[in-house]
Amino acid sequence: MPPRQTGNTLGYTLIIPPGWTKIPLREGTGEAIKEICDDAARRIAHEVPKDKLTEARLEIHRRLSQVVRDAQRRDGLDLYIPVEPLHGRIAPASFIVAKVAVPLKGDVSRQDVMTRLVADFDFTEPAQVHETVGVRGERIVPALPEKEIEFPSRNVDYVLPIPNSEGDWIVVSFSTLGDGDLEGVFSTLLVELFDSLMTTFRWRTE
């Protein structure tokens, strides 16, 4: 049995891979977006005609801002995205860390809540992250144009009860488009990268 957390949980830490960055979704979001767009514009400056560079930067800003708004609507705390190419391309993947409040009422247990939060997943299993036992869910989400889901994706969620809380949860949600084959080697490698990253997750306490 993992040791019990003591002290108030103030947040979390994790180690992200090279070429990825964090966008805070509660404070400092605008500054983070601007920095990412500025860096992207510098990287493509030698590939794009000068008269098209401003237009390209604005398009990057528009797309990134939409992703951020979607993450904020999901009660996100932080959004993590790749910003540098790997083998010539930026990985089509991202993950969100969100805080969710689902109070424990009556006979409802933590396990009941975790089961409900991953009820729509194809595959679920217990997952121990740092000193917390949670649940990991994985699924393929089809394209749903009527819900503004343009492309199918492979999703993995970790649902973790926040230590010493009553009904507060951290949900870490990963999504990738892969290379079009969501069960192929490339998509699986990205999922394995995310799972490896989650082994670095730690609670931050007083």
Image (spheres, rainbow, N blue to C red):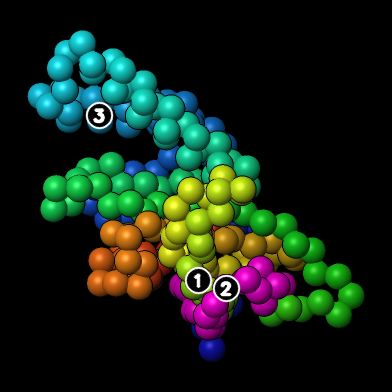
Relative height, residue 42 to residue 131 (above, below): above
Residue found 29% across the figure and 72% down from its top: 184
Circle nearer the viewer, 3 or 2: 2
Residue found 42% across the figure and 33% down from its top: 63
Q: Is residue 128 magenta?
A: yes
Mark closer to the chain start, 1 or 3: 3
Q: Is residue 152 magenta?
A: no
Residue designated by label 1: 139
Q: How far apart are the alpha carbons under marks 2 and 1?
A: 5 Å
Residue designated by label 2: 121
Magenta span: 113-132
Residue designated by label 3: 39
Q: Disc 1 vs disc 3: Cβ atoms closer than 8 Å? A: no
The image quadrant where one finds the C terminus is bottom right
Crowding around mark 1 (Cα neighbors within 10 Å: few <14, some 14 to 19, many 20+) is some
Q: Nearer the viewer, residue 206 or 40?
A: 40
Q: Amino acid at mark 3?
A: Asp
Q: Tag 2's secondary structure?
A: loop
Q: Residue furthest bottom?
A: 1
From the top left corner, tell me how far across and down residue 37 is, in percent: 32, 27
Mark closer to the chain start, 3 or 2: 3
Q: How far apart are the alpha carbons under marks 3 and 2?
A: 36 Å
